[in-house]
Amino acid sequence: MAFLTPLFLIGLAALAVPVLIHLTQKERKSVVHFPSLMFLRKIPYESVQRRRIRDWFLLLLRLAAIAMIVGAFARPFLRGSGVAAAAGGARDIVVLLDRSYSMGYSDTWSRAQRAATEALSGATGADRISLVLFADTAEVALRSTPDASRAVAEITAAQPGPGSTKYGPAIKLAGSLLAESLLPRKEVILVSDFQRGGWQPDDTLRLPGGTTIRTVPVEGAQAASLALTPVSLLRTREANQPERVTVTAGVLNRTAAAAADVPIVLEFDGRVIQDLRISVAPNASQSVSFAPVTITTPNTRATVRLGTAGSASVDALPRDNVFHFVITPAAPVPVMTVSQGAADSMLYLSRALAIGEAPRFDVALQSPEALARDPLTRVRVIMLNDVPIGDALASKLVGFVEGGGGLLMALGPRATWPASRDAWLPATFGAPADRTRGAARLSGMDFGHAIFEPFRAPRSGDFSSARYYSYRTLRAAKDASVLARFDTGEPALVERSAGRGRVIVYASTLDLNWNDLALKPMFLPFVHQLGRHLSGFKEQPAWLTIGQVLDVDAAEVAAGATSGAAARAGVQRTILTPSGQRRELAPPNAPAPGATPAAAAIELTDQGFYEIRGAGREAGPVIVAASNVDLAESNLDRMDPQELVAAVTGNGTSGATPAQDVLPDEAQELAQRVWWYLLFAGILLLITETVIAHRLSRARS
Amino acid sequence: MALANPVPGARFVDPKVLARIGNLEFVAKTVVDGLINGTHRSPFFGASVDFAEHRGYVAGDDIRRVDWRVYARTDKYYIKEFEADSNANFTVLLDVSKSMGFGGDSISKLDYAKTLAACLAYLGNAQRDRVGLITFDEAVVHHVPPSAKHLDVVLHTLDKVEARKPGHLVGPLRKLAEHFGRRGIVIVISDFYAEPEEVFDAVGPIRFRGNDVVLFHVLDPREIEFSFTDPSSFEDMESGDQMPIVPVKLAADYRRLVEAHIEALTKQASQKQIDYMLLNTSMPLDFALFRFLSTRERLARSR
């Protein structure tokens, strides 16, 4: 008998406690005040006699309980017992089973299942088996079990997924599992098709020392393999005509056999629109363009498919024979421009915004009075040019911005803002500065900011050519960003996030009254950048790849969401996945004041179409995102498994070390678990002692 | 220890009931009046008119004390002397050591002793004696000099005494012996937790000065019978020492020792012509007084 933590045996000193309590408790039971002990002292009597232990049985129960509990903490075990006598020492086996979609090629998957099962056939009862299923991510399907049949059942039940191969996460996970192992032999069995594209050498990938890695390459029977490349979309628009889209698809033949007359179809919302045939030479690609189609409804779910739906696959790897994408007519960003003066004061701005497609701005000119009446539910960006703002309107604008809208305040001589809400603006503004005798110029732009990023490169626009004859002096708030300054050093453009939206204060006007910026070539891209940034617009791709993240907020803006809808949709959204599962997308936590709000996002894990709907009657637009498999995974070029073995073991060998004949103490103790029985027995004895003591006490009283 | 049979006709007052009465004068009056009414005669000292002897007249003697009848018969002057003065000093020495506080839920020994002292003082005062009081523990605590007018002071002092300190007989009593120059009656009330020799060493000097000494040995019934049952730690009330005791095993030995102690006190008191009376606090006070006075009268006749 040995102990894993013998220091705990010091706790056996606690055995003296019940004895002392037993002896001292009755001593202190009662004190009788007696006039004199004169006579009592004369009586020959051994006072220790009364300290005899009366309830021997109870005392023994207590002592035994304490001894057992202390013993349990010391973790005893029988050294060199039969449990440790497995031939060659017990193994901790981690099976890494590749389930990327390339494993679905031909009969590769069934071969992989058989190979993994056979690899486990030599496992003994002393061995521990873990099963890790991996593609681009890795997950533990079974953790450290001695039951090989469970591992086989898990392997049999597993199916290849839509992910692409990445060995790194799987190796890391196996390393962490083996790092916890107490068994003398550690073994990794890697069952994969060993695609070259799945391996990125990484010095940080190392298995624990002494780990043996056994590679089991599986290869399906040779068969045809075609793959669809991402489509290209050509949008055309003619005056007063709806938008037309031409879809061009590419087909890649990765085998040495030519593919002839392969059907390829274009489907919109599940209906076949066009049906063509294509022939591809060996190890070559071929593209095919479908006839232009008119897109009138948003979120049209388009699919290009090799072969026809419901028929047998045209090759041995069906997952890459389909390509999903979403076609949506470009939705304009609704912008409201407000000016106090004549309508032509906003001429330059409205004309500048009217030009452009990505995004298109739908500009509406309003007077301040109309702005006060507008509920602001159909607008994404408001641009104020020299407008006095009262308290009521300021309150309305604050709500608009914090709900997700964008606000640009261009300041002229008449611009005001209620003093009570000064702290909300990124900058407080003072009296106009007159620079008619020496025009001020813009300098010190923050080219790292999204607004000025297009002007970063040399000869991309010279803002200093614009002359400012007057401007309002600004004092930027502490948490605001100054995006541009005048040559005097005073802030010219100041920004701050507010709630889910943004607000920018511009020290001068957007017309020609105080400056001539509107006459300069950079005016158009500048106001476009302002509009894009304030609206949060991001061009949405027609498709994404599995593993990418969909920015739901940006997608809503691109789909024409207004600020009100965005604010409401921020509360709750429902996601419908390609597999038909429905789940809730929790709204992101409220951001700290001045901080950029966290975006709502989902990671794409399935192949097909994701649909996101906002909750409520006035929810924002429905978002549909297409998710496709990674085309690189369809490249079945193989690597040498030894390359991977050498990288993760560090010495180019399999890393095997001589097995120990006997398990280490920790492993033996873990296998025997004597402490558990001792602890249980100790607690049982304590309960018995309590019951007996209670009954004895009642009987005596 | 069994109590003596009560005397028919006497009214026995329960000490516990008396202990609840705060006014000691009232208690003493109640007890003593009841006692006198019950016996129809006072058995106490009537010595002030008792003839003792004749002696020859010497110059300076009061001629009023000349026995003229003897002169008529013998033609010589003789002075007639009496046994004692009618107004003798009557002093109560009360032990107020901590051990006297024992009593638990019944009357304490000190309360019993205080009531007894009050009764005796009242009785003495009724006899026109000068009553005084001395309380002591390890030293003298209160001293009320004997006086015909000091009954109130004595009762008041008795009322306020408390058992606070450990006691010691020899020291204070030897010191007090010097003050008993005039012969009188000295009553010592104590639990006498000392060896008999030590007790009589303490009271001996008082007796040698011609005082009539009476010892009242006050004990609680549990001190005599040792009726404890549970094993406990017994703590000496005076020294604070503790001793683990299993009463069942010790009771017999303890009772034997206590009986031997009482017997030794009784015997030595008799040898030294000192009156000794054991009082159990469960014994009614007037019965205890009656028994004591009866015994004294009997002894006075025999002396």
Image (cartoon, coloured by chain):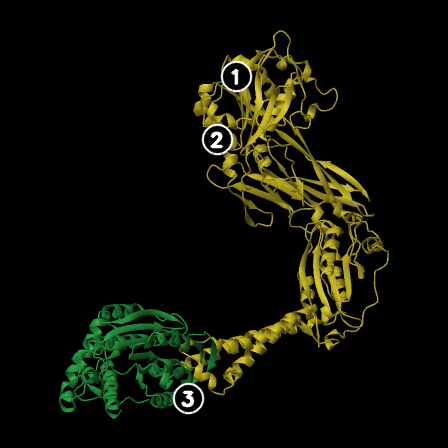
Chain colours: A yellow, B green
Task: Name the residue that disc number 3 marks.
Answer: B257
Task: Name the residue that disc number 1 marks.
Answer: A386
Determine which of the numbered discs, if any, sits on residue A697 in the image.
none
Q: Residues within 10 Å of mark 3 (few under 14, many from 20)?
A: some
Judged from the image, the secondary structure of the residue bearing numbered disc 1 is loop
The chain letter under disc 1 is: A
Of A152 and A450, which appears nearest the observer? A450
Of A688 and A147, which appears nearest the observer? A688
Relative to B31, does residue A216 appear above or below in the rendering?
above
Badges 1 and 3: C-beta atoms under 8 Å apart? no
Q: Quadrant of the N terminus of chain A?
A: bottom right
Total numbered labels: 3
Please name the amino acid that badge 2 sits on. Gly
* Residue B220 is at least partly visible in this image: yes
Task: Name the residue that disc number 2 marks.
Answer: A399
Relative to A602, does residue B132 appear above or below in the rendering?
below
The answer for how far apart the CA atoms under marks 2 and 3 are is 101 Å
Q: Is residue A338 left or right of residue B94?
A: right
The answer for how far apart the CA atoms under marks 1 and 2 are is 20 Å
Q: Residues within 10 Å of mark 1 (few under 14, many from 20)?
A: many
Q: Is residue A137 left or right of residue A394?
A: right
Q: Position of residue A85 (x, y in %)?
A: 76, 75
Q: Which image quarter: residue A129?
A: bottom right
Mark nearest the camera among 1 and 3 is 3
Please name the amino acid that badge 3 sits on. Leu
Judged from the image, the secondary structure of the residue bearing numbered disc 3 is helix
Q: Quadrant of the C terminus of chain A?
A: bottom left
Q: Position of residue A475 (x, y in %)?
A: 57, 22
Judged from the image, the secondary structure of the residue bearing numbered disc 2 is helix
Q: Position of residue A550 (x, y in %)?
A: 62, 40
Of A530 and A256, which appears nearest the observer? A530
Q: Mark 1 vs mark 2: which is more N-terminal?
A: 1
